[in-house]
Amino acid sequence: MALCFHIYYRNNSSLIVMEWGVCEIPPVWEGQWFQSGVTQPIIINATHISTKGECYHRYDNDYIFRYTERNNPDYCYSCINIHMKHTNVLQYKETPRACSPLRDRNELCLDIDLDSQYSMFRGGDAVPISCPFRSPPFSVSYNGGKGKCSVPPSTADSCTDESRLLFRYAACPDIPGSQSALEEMVCLATWKDGNDRFLVARLEMEHKLAAQDEDKFRCFLYTRNGNGEYKVAQSGDATCNGLQSTNDGSKTMVLTPKESQHERCKFPAWVVNHHQWHSLDFAHAYHFLHRNATLRVTGADGETHSRLVCHKIHSNTSSHQVSIVALITTGCENGYICMIFYQRDAHVIQVYRSTRRSQDENEACNPEYFDGVTSTNPVTLVTSSLKPMHCPNPGRFSITASMKPPQAQPVTTEVEDSDGKKPSQCQGEKPAYTSVAIGCSEPSDMMEFYSSCPEEPSKGYNCHGSWTENLTSYLVVSPASRKSTDAKHYCFVFIQKQGQMSLHRVATSCSPPQHPTPWSFNITNPGKCTESSASKDASSMFIPSLFCLFGSAVAILILR
């Protein structure tokens, strides 16, 4: 509740009555601030600015502060005219710093020095904003006062975080003082004064990792023409003083958009028909944006890990496979990579990508950067909501043994069962699960493991998508009854090798595991759902309809 009181004093032999109240500083100003020339952080709370004193009275943008000086028991009063340009920027003008008694506001504020202007920038708790320079990357020419440096050109590249821009300054042989430098701009505030547009940013310089705030904060005046080109003037210190035009500044720059093929490249329709995909373990989300040309990869916490822009189609070998060169940005590092997309099922795709980046778009798919699908594991992506589907080629199998890893080889890490335990072996060396049925229970959308151990109940999975490649079959499933320790989805991998068949459950991607997982089994005796696999002779169980691939006599499991 505001408190008011009256002050009476004589001025020029007349009695003046003034009404004052409790002054509250706007809550949005509270926090820690930086001002050039002030060595300590400035703290603002509801009633005080640490370098100005206690807020005593407010009238519009004029604030009366009172403070005390050493060896002076009386209060001193000053008038400060404060404008919030942005939640991260305050600018003010004030009366000269001299102890003044309390006077009428108009008289006290009349002493404000109109030629003085001070800027305060919010400190460590400042929330960055999206940089105003749209559509990077840019080719950059700059002038530090000794001539225009444009050959070789400098560059400004986007970062994963849209509040950051990475400048790579090149040294020009004919310009004294020009030098190569890496500078990261963190945008903090923008505002408009008349026709002038201003930006405040924090500059992180590679060669000045321990730089003080005095060296990091800079103010910029900028304009943009119809061609998307920006003219920028940079202040020489941590203030906005002296920026009158984009032709005058401690440094002036011209940012010219680089010509790009991005607009002519789009991700395949069968990919972008679902604008959001998830990795098999739901650790990452893949969002397709901006007219199907941009892919943003985020973590479970929603933080963007990387951004990929479709640059050009490298090859389009079939309606279900496409190879793309993409510009990838991670943090503020950029480069070109090769990506191959495979449509595995209506709601399942796989992506192979190069692990090394090239700065030349024409080299990204060369063997030195990308060795095709042989040397990298794919990322398996599923749509946000998978519906159960009929399991492919229903049948029953006997589990003959749990597979053990080779000597001195670790068991592949995998999510444990819903009860927190790995499958046990309750009868000597025999596995807990003795058989598996695929699509044998109505409505034929379940894969079920059966156990002869009392402590191991049967376990079921819903079928969602399947395919076969290189004598190996894959089935994407989800636990029918999921508990907190279960993964959201699993992939069962069926491998036919040297006349033997094995089954593996993996939780991160659909690719054959290098070593056995806790759910790796040898299986045999395939039979129809209506038959008992245990009562049949093994040689009679290789049902042609289940174990032939496009009419081949080679016995493999087809899950499609």
Image (cartoon, rainbow, N blue to C red):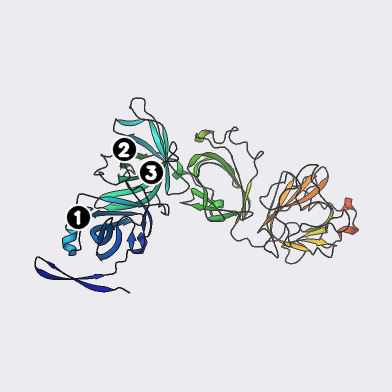
Three-letter code for the amino acid on which mark 1 is drawn: Ile
Q: CA distance from mark 3 to mark 2?
A: 15 Å
* Residue that protrudes farthest toward the top in the picture: 174
Question: Dot 3, how many residues are within 10 Å of its Cα: few (below 14), some (14-19), or many (20+)?
Answer: some
Kindly indicate the quadrant of the structure image that contains residue 352.
top right
Kindly indicate the quadrant of the structure image that contains residue 65.
bottom left
Q: Which residue is mark 2?
A: 251
Question: Dot 1, how many residues are within 10 Å of its Cα: few (below 14), some (14-19), or many (20+)?
Answer: some
State the SS at label 2. Answer: strand
Q: CA distance from mark 1 to mark 2?
A: 31 Å
State the SS at label 1. Answer: loop
Q: Are marks 3 and 2 in contact (CB under 8 Å)?
A: no
Q: Nearer the viewer, mark 1 or mark 2?
A: 1
Q: Nearer the viewer, mark 3 or mark 2?
A: 3
Q: Are marks 1 and 2 in contact (CB under 8 Å)?
A: no
Q: CA distance from mark 3 to mark 1?
A: 29 Å
Which is more toward the observer, 494 or 298? 298
Which mark, residue 216? 3
Residue 240 in the image, given as x and y percentages of width and height: 29, 47
Which is more toward the observer, 255 or 227? 255
Q: Which residue is mark 1?
A: 112
Residue 130, above or below 246:
below
Which mark, residue 288? none
Residue 337 visible in image = yes
Three-letter code for the amino acid on which mark 2 is drawn: Lys
State which tag comes first along the sequence, 1 or 2: 1
Residue 52 in the image, given as x and y percentages of width and height: 29, 57
Q: Are marks 3 and 1 in contact (CB under 8 Å)?
A: no
Question: Dot 2, how many residues are within 10 Å of its Cα: few (below 14), some (14-19), or many (20+)?
Answer: some
